[in-house]
Image: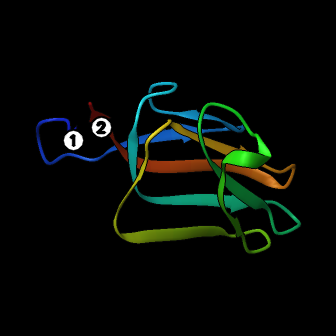
Amino acid sequence: MYLEQGPEVGRVILAAGAVVGISGKPVALYGYTFKSAGTAGVLTFFNGTAATAANVAWDDTGIISTTKVVALASGIVFPNGLFASFDANITTGTFFVRQVLT
């Protein structure tokens, strides 16, 4: 497995939970931001193409009416694809990723 050519990390902006990158293909996550509304939102990451309990990677809780910025020390590879699930209190999310070639 290796990353696409070039040093660039792309960004994907979502207004609702969805697949980040190419569905079912490995992707490396380098960081993310998400904005909570009037209640702290919860962002859940899944290794796969849908929100299924068996594929939960981790949850992150936001800050009320604030954009939370998370920079990861290194890329985390989701070998079965990356699905980001938003609860009702998240308005937008931005994900900094690179597709992985296999």
Under mark 1, the amino acid is: Leu
Residue 3 numbered mark, or none? 1
As displayed, is residue 23 above or below residue 69? above
For the point 51% across and 25% down, the residue is 23
Observer-nearest of 102 and 66: 102
Residue type at mark 2 is Val
| Closest to the observer, 102 or 94 | 102
Residue 83: image location, x then y, percent: 61, 40
Neighbor class of circle 2 (other Cα within 10 Å; few <14, some 14-19, many 20+) is many
| The quarter of the displayed image where residue 43 is located | bottom right
Residue ID at (76%, 53%): 90
Q: For residue 75, what is the image quadrant? A: bottom left
Q: Please name the residue that numbered disc 2 is placed on.
A: 100
Q: Quadrant of the N terminus?
A: top left
Q: Tell me the SS state at disc 2.
A: strand
Earlier sequence position, callout 1 versus callout 2: 1
Rendered position, 62 above or below 78: below
Q: Position of residue 92 (x, y in %)?
A: 66, 47
**Horizontal and vertical percent for residue 21?**
45, 32
Quarter of the image that includes the C terminus: top left
Residue 98 in the image: above or below residue 74: above
Percent of width and height locating residue 62: 72, 70
Q: Is residue 40 left or right of residue 99?
A: right
**C-alpha distance separating marks 1 and 2:** 4 Å
